[in-house]
Amino acid sequence: MNFEEAFASYERVRHRLPSTKSNKSYTNLPNLDALVEHMDVFLLDAFGVLNIGDTAIKGVPERIAGLQKAGKRVMVVSNAAGFPHAMLMQKYKTLGYNFAPEDVITSRKAILHALHNSSPIEMGSYGNRDFGAWRYRVI
């Protein structure tokens, strides 16, 4: 699906989506470079933006490196709950990205942070041991 097809699909369901209250106009830009002088931080999704599976999207590692070289903070927000943080960091490094560990935020990392900072509770989570399955208990 190309951009025009994706946008047409969005337009077909627009009536079912929440309306916006913004009166601002929007401009199509050729790429992220057009935003560099206006932004300090870029928040990017991972899958489909940085990579598809174990393959970096062509040209994206270089574009991200350019943003970082320009002094911009590039953060990844991802729902990669199945991957321990260290494994995900190694994956991005292998794909050609150079993210600081604190700049990769996942749903897994967020929930572990919340559990660590919560009042004592008892709960469990089960999964594949190879991906850091654990039983967590705080008393």
Image (tube, grey):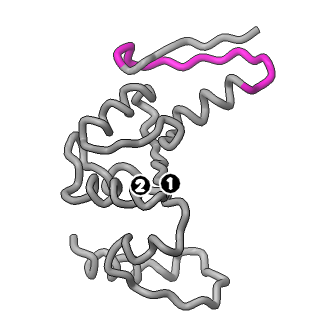
Secondary structure mostly seen in the magenta stretch: loop
Q: Give coordinates of residue 60: x percent, y percent.
A: 27, 57
Q: Mark 1 points at which residue?
A: 73
Mark 2: which amino acid? Gln
Camera-nearest residue between 82 and 16: 82
For residue 91, above or below residue 16: above
Image marks 1 and 2: residues in contact by CB distance under 8 Å? yes
Label 1's element? Answer: strand
The region drawn magenta spans: 117-130
Residue 83: quadrant of the picture: top left
Residue 125: quadrant of the picture: top right
The magenta stretch spans residue 122: yes
The image quadrant where one finds the C terminus is: top right
Q: In the shown orientation, is residue 77 left or right of residue 32?
A: right
Q: Mark 2 points at which residue?
A: 68
Q: Which residue is drawn at 33% across and 54% down?
A: 65
Q: Please tell me which of labels 1 and 2 falls first in the chain.
A: 2
Q: How crowded is mark 1: few (under 14 residues within 10 Å), some or many (20 or more)?
A: some
Mark 1: which amino acid? Arg
For residue 56, above or below residue 102: below
Q: Give coordinates of residue 114: x percent, y percent.
A: 68, 31
The magenta stretch spans residue 59: no
Camera-nearest residue between 44 and 11: 44
Camera-nearest residue between 68 and 44: 68
